[in-house]
Image (cartoon, rainbow, N blue to C red):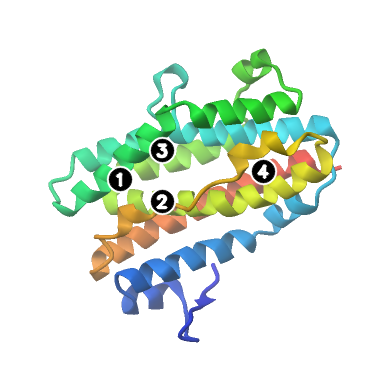
Amino acid sequence: MNGMELNSNRVASPNQAVEEYIGEQFLEWLQNFIAVEVKSWPELAAVATASPKIERVRKFMLQYFLAAEAFLGGREGDPGFLGFALANLSESNDPLAEAALEGLEKKQQEELSGDKRMLWLKLLHALGLTDEEIKRAEPKEPTRNYVAELSDVYSNLEWQTAMGAFAAHERSVVEEGLVLLEMLSRVAGISGENYGILKAGPANTHVLDKIVFDQENKRLVWEGVKRQLDARHELYKGLSRYLET
């Protein structure tokens, strides 16, 4: 992974950032790092410039939807990454976990409101997918691998690592949405009102606010960020093949 330049004109590797930056400075570096890292993926750049047939776009977006759905869960009682993270936090006796737990509970309430799923269905329907096709969709190997990797991160690793993964997810989907919007606007032939799900708001990284003031917590957070970004990158390596002509 690449380092990046801060306003101080210092170039920091992840190890340097964990060692030297603290609190808000570390979070600023982390936000910038995630954005730059996501933009550096060749597979995502290929998505931005792809001109596939609509059938390939449907296959790609359906798998992307299943990956997004895995965050919240819901199919066959699956609690999703968010449910795993909440259970992970709930088991911690660390007082610092309480603030992070409150942030995740708020996120879950927002997700469960139904608005996100409605926006997804609006986009998938506009692309020509039926409710039956969406219901019957099964994750292919890249999506299955992504779900398995992150289920482990959110369920079994330290809660600080799970929070790092969550923050990286929140920031990366903002950048990814811009790329998908660029591709779909060019090739899908559907009106702009259908793209609401790709126009993500500011990334929610407040779950990290109180836990990036000591070396061990920063190290655990960084491990979660790295695992999330690596899993996301591998997902694009697999899914981008759907768009190849």
Crowd tier of the residue under label 3, counting other residues whose Cα lies within 10 Å: few below 14, some 14–19, many 20 or above: many
Q: Amino acid at mark 2?
A: Asn
Helix, strand or loop at label 1? It is: helix
Of the two numbered discs 1 and 3 on the same chain, state the one appearing first in sequence: 1
The label on residue 151 is 3
- Residue 204 numbered mark, or none: 2
Relative depth, front residue between 179 and 119: 119
Badge 4: residue crowd in 10 Å (few <14, some 14–19, many ≥20): some
Alpha carbon separation for disc pair 3 and 4:
18 Å
Residue pictured at 83% horizontal, 41% vertical? 187
Q: Position of residue 42 (x, y in %)?
A: 70, 59
Q: Is residue 203 left or right of residue 47?
A: left
Instruction: Say which residue appears at 62% left-offset and 16% top-offset.
Output: 136
Amino acid type at image mark 4: Gly
In the picture provided, is 110 more to the left or to the right than 191? Answer: left
The C terminus sits in image quarter: top right
**Label placed on residue 103:** 1
